[in-house]
Amino acid sequence: MGADWTSELIVPDEQGAAPTAEDHPSAVAPPGYRPFPRMTREQCAEAVRRGGWLFKADEGHDPDGSVPVEAVEGAWQVDAHGRPLRFRPNPRYGAPLPEQPVGDGAAPLPPLHAGRRPAGRALLGWLEDPQAPRLCRIAGSSGSGRSHLLHWLAAACPADSPHPRRRTDVLLSAAESTVDTFVWRLAALLGVSAADPDELVAALIDGVPRVLVVTDLDRAGAGRLSDAAQRIAAEVLRPLLRVPWLRLVVECASDTPAAAALDVPAAVLDLDQPQWTDLDAFTRWATALAERQLPAEVYPSPALALLAARTGDGVLLDPAATPARKAETLAETWWESLPELVRAPVVVLASVRGGLDTELWGELPGSLGPFAVHEAVDLLLPADPEGRYRVWPDAFAERLARSGLDHLSIRQNLLPEQPGPQDAARLDLVLRHAVRTSTAVDDLLADPAVLVHADPSAVGLALEHAAAVRVADAGQRAELAQAEARREALADGKEFDEELARQFSDADRAAAGRTPVHRAWRLAGPRVTATDDPAERASALHCWTVAHDGGLAERFAELAGHEWRARWAFAGGTDPVHLLARHEDRLAVAVGWDVVVLDPATGRSADESFARLTDRSTVALAAGHEGGAWALRRSGAVEELRPSSDAVRRLLAAMDDGATALAARGGEQRAVATGDASGRVHLLDDRDGTDAVHSDAPLHAAPVTAVDLAHHGGHHLLVSGGLDGAVQAWMPGRGPLSPPVPARDVPVTAVAVATTPGGLVCAAAWTDGLVRVVLAGAERVTHDLRLGAPAVGLALTDEGRLCVATATGVLGIDLTTA
């Protein structure tokens, strides 16, 4: 096999020489070895500059340009120091996408008013042109119709359009989003699971062309989160634009930090420029609004025309003024023309500092009730696509709000003492208004009912804002303390250590931002965002609060209404958890490059490191007899992490194909098991030197992704999961066994099996985050768990405790409370 199999993702030395077999003498390259491309030092440095990802395309193709999906081999991921972490292969590499002819039944394009057909044609042209830049940025001032144009595009080009080059897959507003909530919402809309931008990129390295439409980027964040738009652009959108088959349409004004962060070639439609608006069509549309000629200076802004139509004649606009100044002038005239009856509800609406539907608007004190709200609606700009009204422009609304409602008035009149699912919209308004006005709502953010019933985006925004406030306050306290310490050192003639003081200050600020609820929300957020079911939200939050606040965790469990309980949680910290295996009576967990040992009874880690990985592309961890341990890399190579018997080498040598899954058991019934790319499973009893045994036929219609084994009824029982979504059971020498867990249509990520005092227990996890546990005792009992992120490993103790590893940490769960 030579030296190549030891060096996947390993950088050559300074002379460029490849590592030799002696560099990793413990690695075993089985038949079917699937090496991944290696990186040079220059490629590692380039990957760091690109945010951690570097795509590899066939010679003659530029992954940053227009490149066929089938010409992209995949992408390397590196850490912040340039060390290779993994290579994500493109499953469609070498397989051209079939031609998709234009189908029948294409619906006519929806109307596009205000003379915007030139802009609409330009957008369609960009969409249909495979050579166009991957980014189309829609610029312009507030009120220029950017959001309206993108909603039109999504309606005109749905994902199921019979025209293959006229499809958009996702429409997502970034208004008042944080980086986390934006990633979680986008992942939910795409049907993938991702807790952070890197996981989102990894999930979309699937060779599937998609067009993502993002509106309101300029309105991301609120309050202390003023950099949210720039962060979303830099940390989420910019990395997504590296994926060769993704295209983005983004609403983002020019000359902003967010626009600067999108530093890639782009097609830009600036709707303030007249070439995107037909003057004659705009004039006819604007005249019809008020049945009179409107000031010529409103062109080409639809919002200016709509506002001018709601004012009287004789408004003078400075042709040289900015659109924002013209809007202020029109708003002032419009306000003076309003009847007294509707001024009060308009002030109330402005006080909200955001959009509001008429039902909630009418409930607010000072709105004068539904009749007055109805009268005011006809004098406002039209509602947004969600049916919400707002006072425009924002600067004018802010001035009106100063004489309107305060936060306490809104909260007292809208929220009941015990909020429930019917109060979701009220909670959303109260939480968002608290952020807009920098009002503390710590009591609400500690109330489980609020956290499970409110819109997760509003909760995430409020939690991030509260954390930013605490961090800023801690920073101010640290600066005062440092100044005092500096004065004392000077008075005593001592040297003041500025670097040490800065480190303590940074640590204090970081700790100030992390409350138990905030920590739990970051871990459970992907699942909480992806579901509308309060019980599922409560389950995920229950798991991740147990480590810091047992009482709060129990309240979440009661809201969820399930019998099982999380008993401990181990957080991986800054490095992701990516492997889990039973190690005798303990757990072996891969966190970053290190393999640590946890006590399954308490979740506490041992002081010493169990082992260290040499390759982060490891897909399975197995711990066997007398402390031995092995790591299976994605390529099929197996590395011995701790010395043991030669059982793994013997089993691999007996296989016709390379391993895709690996498991082991120690103790008196010690054995090792593997699965392969053909769907077969293999087992070697490590007690008596017998030969390996193999399943007669494939158990799966695709590669095996996970295996585990137990001793049951005097025999070895092997359970496997596959890329086909099936979970199968196999005993050597026995006929076909019934699947222990029903198959699903998404790949299996982990399986576990154990013989417990209550009977045989089998667990399986899939890529969509579901963990299903079946207890085959006197009665067959099934538990479905969704814990925040897909499981990367499962383990069952002999006592029946389920241990689940996700990228964010490990949980110990008792399936019954008895």
Image (cartoon, grey):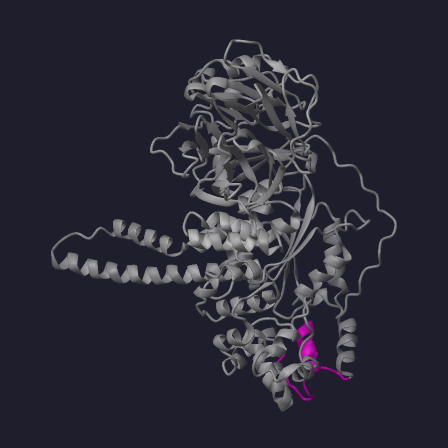
Q: Nearer the viewer, residue 416 or 631?
A: 416
In the picture shown, does residue 575 fall above or below 149? above
Q: Position of residue 46 (x, y in %)?
A: 50, 38
Q: Residue at x 69, y 68 (%)?
A: 274
Q: Is residue 249 above or below residue 414?
A: above
From the viewer's perspective, tell me whether residue 159 is left or right of residue 626: right
Q: Which residues are magenta?
A: 292-319
Q: Say which quarter of the image contains residue 742.
A: top right
Residue furthest toward the bottom?
340
- In front of the other: 39 or 731: 731
User: Does the magenta portion include 762?
Assistant: no
Q: Where's residue 234, x and y in %?
A: 52, 51
Q: Of 172 and 127, which appears nearest the observer?
A: 172
Specify whether residue 297 is painted magenta: yes
Q: Taken as a whole, is the magenta stretch helix, strand or loop?
A: loop
The image quadrant that residue 268 belongs to is: bottom right
Camera sees residue 507? yes
Q: Is residue 655 visible in the rendered structure shown here? A: no
| Residue 624 position in % (x across, y down) | 47, 21
- Whole-percent x, y for residue 36 in the image: 57, 26
- Name the quarter where the N terminus is drawn: top right
Residue at the front extreme?
Answer: 778
Give the residue at x 54% y 29%. Answer: 754
* Residue 629 placement: quadrant: top left
Which residue in the rendered view is the most extreme toward the left?
492
Q: Say if 804 sits above or below 429 in the image.
A: above
